[in-house]
DNA sequence: AGCTCCTAAAGTGCATGCAATCTTGCACGC
DNA sequence: GCGTGCAAGATTGCATGCACTTTAGGAGCT
């Protein structure tokens, strides 16, 4: 079971082909900068977004280190960074596990994200440029393509739309908080999502962009509210479901 | 200059007399739990809130470790946690320094905090109990006392009012984000504050509580908006002031 | 005297090693 | 045959040690 981690990490290697640093080559930057951690981090995040890694799953630090041919201390740094972002939970003497948010926590995360996204939208409506709108529109097209082709990365793309929105607040602080919440929401969806009407979600993305273009923050927020109602509506947040999706209950 | 850190940390020992764990005794919990890090962390935060530690100041990790009689690795963990919260900045091969936010970053932090506090208020107005209001009112009395007595911890108390508000959103996720922003704002004020009309700020705290009691979120938000206008108004966020308060420009 | 270079001390960044703990597999007993 | 207890292997948590970088101080030169 534990080798699945390594396997999936390898799978990720072949999957996300467009990496930013092809000239990275050997992992020689022994001292000084440490982009290696960032690479591992990004890959793990991508694996989560595409739901190759599931909540509750163990992240063995020696296997993680071996998979990327880095010393164990490097792997641990990545895991601890993920811990600080609440993506990963440490159990004493047992190691790192992908966080398995409780139903209550899930409600709180979504509630917080709602408000932050609303705030973001009001800023975006003040600050978005024509170029920003083009980027958003193009991204939505990519989303639609991915969904119609049933591609695995469709979910990741849908999440990245919100990353783009966060970026367009032109407020890096708000952006970082929003991105953190978006990622935690992915985790939540991995646990509690029962049905996904994803296509209708991208159409809401489109409506949001329309409202932004009209600089109508109230309209944008209204659509976003519906958007969240749909997303939360697709979750089964009853408490007793929390352990229903326990790892041991997976379709072995 | 570097021994001031140890000195101030010791000063903190004598200063914050009411610590939660008197029975802690020896730091023997060699393995397992690690409350030691939490103690060090809390103390550093308190020192920042009371402005004994200033932005730009070096946090020497061996001296920090010696001051609390813990191995260096423990001290480093604390510093890295502070780094993740953007309280501390690491410079390669030079160590940890208290973050010195730029004027632009300061604006972004306050902007984000504004919106999050507004969101929090709307939740508080729905959820605050009578007991919550009592706690807030009592805290305001403590603030007034501290200010009238010119006590050093007055600033910390004023900040903690917002911590209490965050807590009363009954949303731990939102609470944590808010508290993080409050702390960064203290750092910002340490750098950029030019005049502090603190007493009028506590009266605004009082008005906010009144609005909460009336369950009038809009009114509460309006007061909070004025509150922030006053706080930001007491800052000099011109870019050229950024290096005016350089550490080396401190008295002496 | 002032400036520059050089050497020594201090301090960080990180990998590794060790002890404690957990887990897995097996043997023994029921 | 099934459950329990034990021992070996695996794995984590953490302190320490080492190599490298920065910094401070002084000697020598101009």
Image: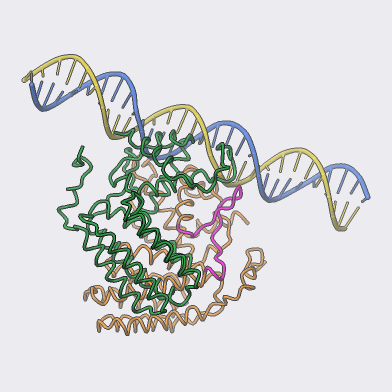
Chain colours: A green, B orange, C yellow, D blue
Q: Which residues are magenta?
A: B85-105
Q: Is residue B141 left or right of residue B195?
A: left
- The residue at the point 31 percent across, 73 percent down is A223
Membership of A221 in magenta stretch: no
Q: Quadrant of the C terminus of chain A?
A: top left
- The residue at the point 38 percent across, 49 percent down is A83
Q: Position of residue B25 (x, y in %)?
A: 37, 47
B45 above or below A81?
A: below
Q: Quadrant of the N terminus of chain A?
A: top left
Corner quadrant of residue B149: bottom left
Along the line of sight, the residue nearer the viewer: A32 or B4: A32
Tally of marks: 0
Along the line of sight, the residue nearer the viewer: C29 or A249: A249
Q: Is residue A165 left or right of residue B192?
A: left
Q: Position of residue B31 (x, y in %)?
A: 36, 39
Along the line of sight, the residue nearer the viewer: B62 or A226: A226
- The residue at the point 29 percent across, 71 percent down is A225
Q: Position of residue A108 (x, y in %)?
A: 27, 63
B249 above or below B8?
A: below
Q: Is residue A194 left or right of residue A15?
A: left
Membership of B97 in magenta stretch: yes
Corner quadrant of residue A208: bottom left
Q: Position of residue B171 (x, y in %)?
A: 28, 65
B146 above or below A7?
A: below
- The residue at the point 18 percent across, 42 percent down is A249
Along the line of sight, the residue nearer the viewer: B144 or A109: A109
Corner quadrant of residue A181: bottom left
């Amino acid at each position: 079971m534990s080798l699945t981690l390594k396997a999936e990490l390898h799978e990720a290697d072949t999957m996300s082909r467009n990496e930013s640093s092809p000239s990275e080559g050997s992992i020689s930057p022994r001292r000084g900068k440490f982009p290696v951690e960032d690479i591992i981090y990004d890959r793990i995040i991508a694996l989560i977004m595409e739901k190759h890694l599931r909540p509750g799953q163990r992240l063995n630090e020696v296997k993680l280190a071996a998979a990327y041919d880095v010393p164990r201390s490097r792997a641990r740094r990545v895991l601890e960074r993920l811990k600080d972002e609440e993506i990963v939970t440490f159990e004493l003497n047992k190691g790192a596990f992908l966080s398995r948010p409780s139903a209550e926590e899930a409600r709180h995360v979504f509630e917080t994200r709602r408000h932050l996204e609303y705030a973001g939208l009001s800023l975006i409506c003040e600050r978005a440029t024509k170029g920003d709108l083009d980027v958003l529109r193009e991204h939505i097209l990519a989303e639609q393509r991915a969904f119609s082709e049933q591609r695995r990365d469709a979910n990741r793309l849908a999440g990245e739309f919100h990353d783009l929105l966060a970026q367009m607040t032109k407020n890096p602080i708000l952006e970082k908080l929003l991105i953190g919440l978006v990622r935690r929401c992915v985790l939540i969806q991995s646990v509690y999502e029962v049905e996904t009407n994803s296509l209708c979600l991208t159409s809401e993305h489109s409506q949001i962009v329309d409202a932004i273009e009209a600089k109508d923050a109230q309209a944008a927020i209204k659509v976003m509210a519906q958007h969240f109602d749909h997303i939360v509506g697709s979750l089964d947040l009853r408490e007793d479901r929390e352990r229903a999706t326990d790892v041991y209950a997976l379709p072995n």
